[in-house]
Amino acid sequence: MAPSVAIIGVTLLSAVAGCHTSRGPLARAASPTDVGLNTRDVVDPVAQPLADAALTTLDASTPAREAGDAARERAGAAAQDARHVLCLSGGGSYGAYAAGVLCGWTQSGRRPAFDVVTGISTGALIAPFAFLGPRYDGAIRHFYTETRTRDVYVKRPVRGLFSEALADDAPLRRTIDGMVTWGFVADIAAAHREGRRLYVGTTELEGRRFIVWDVGGIACRGRPDDRALICDVLAASAAIPGFFPPVRIPVSIDGRVLAEKHGDGGVTQGIFFRPPWPPDRPAAGTRVWCVVAGKLYADPAPLRPRALAIAGRSLSDIIFAQTRGDLQRIYTLAQLNGMDFQMTAIADDFPAPAESTEFNPPELRAMFDEGFRQAQSGRAWRGTPPGVAPGEAPRERAGTCLTEVPKR
């Protein structure tokens, strides 16, 4: 979305100049964010209302109403025996919000026992604790309110340019190793035998494919390397490619012992769903809870005129869009199968940190407290996917004369 910022800058300045463009001075002209405008609020006053009306008409169409009514009917029929699936996204230090949601949910007295928990990246680190229940709330609260950057990684920018990572994640590996004890593994195995499921996603970097690990299945193998494999999977899911080194996981392929290279699951998926066990049981009535560790849309910010900065910003935008797309797919799946969809994310107007790779306790506590408050009060959840709430529709343009319409 970086190119769109430049386009908005061009068009807004054109509006100020009476909608007359002159390419010469634009290279030095200020952008909307440079002058303090929130680009989310900059719209084409002619085209945008027409686009919003068209989307509203589509949402209210007969097929859409019939699909929604049928899904609600199926869900209502099965609500007495509802099962619960928790899906946790990636998001680095923004995982503090997800941790706060879980702890506030517990405090409200409304948090269910989860039949399935899935996690990616920072969500993978939270997932085992969420899976095992509120007795582990203290552990996730401590990690996501007290951790400092040096407790997660050590930067090595010069040496990193000539190796496979810009940072050493040994501190995080030590933390994971300390948390995942044999008793912890035994608790996961016991829950798995009861029919509950815990899944963590990684990216197999050479195959460029998303891999789902059945962590409970690993815990039940009864092998001496079970704990080490679970630690590797959790570390791999949070290993940002290029920033953290890939995790080498030994595999046996037709008797040959080889090493796969695994990294952040968020590279290939932002959040994912798995149905409750057994899979042949109708899904109607299942409640799907999606917790986004971060915002649905990136905060506007001035763009530095540097190739690496532009490329990095664009990659971040792709990840935001991917997570929204994954949420929309989960919502559609829920609608088609009579499941109830609920999601939560950090509100647009919350002053979240600019970098998800920095762990600063005051900022972590602020995000944790926000998630806690929202979940405890019951205000955290919405039943609609990204793209349908006010201000979330794609911006449509029929020209370059724009106006600022602040969100009320």
Image (spheres, rainbow, N blue to C red):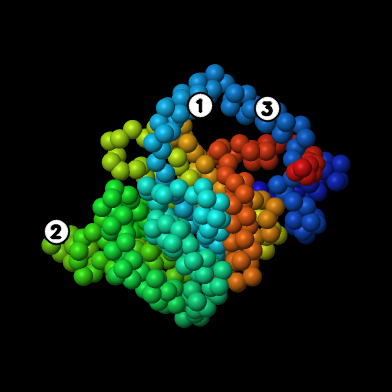
Q: What residue sits right under mark 3 in the picture?
A: 53
* Residue 46: percent from left, percent from top: 76, 31
Q: Is residue 226 visible?
A: yes
Mark 3 residue type: Ala
| Helix, strand or loop under label 2 | loop
Residue that label 2 marks = 254
Q: Position of residue 182 (x, y in %)?
A: 29, 70
Task: Say if 323 sits above or below 141 in the image.
Answer: above
Q: Which residue is mark 1?
A: 68
Q: Nearer the viewer, residue 14 or 386?
A: 386
Residue 327 sits above or below residue 317 on the image = above
Q: Nearer the viewer, mark 2 or mark 1?
A: 1
* Residue type at tag 1: Gly
User: In the visual, does 260 lie left or right of 60?
Assistant: left
Whether residue 262 is situated above or below residue 287 in the rendered picture: below
Q: Residue at x 70, y 28 (%)?
A: 50
Q: Residues within 10 Å of mark 3 (few under 14, many from 20)?
A: few
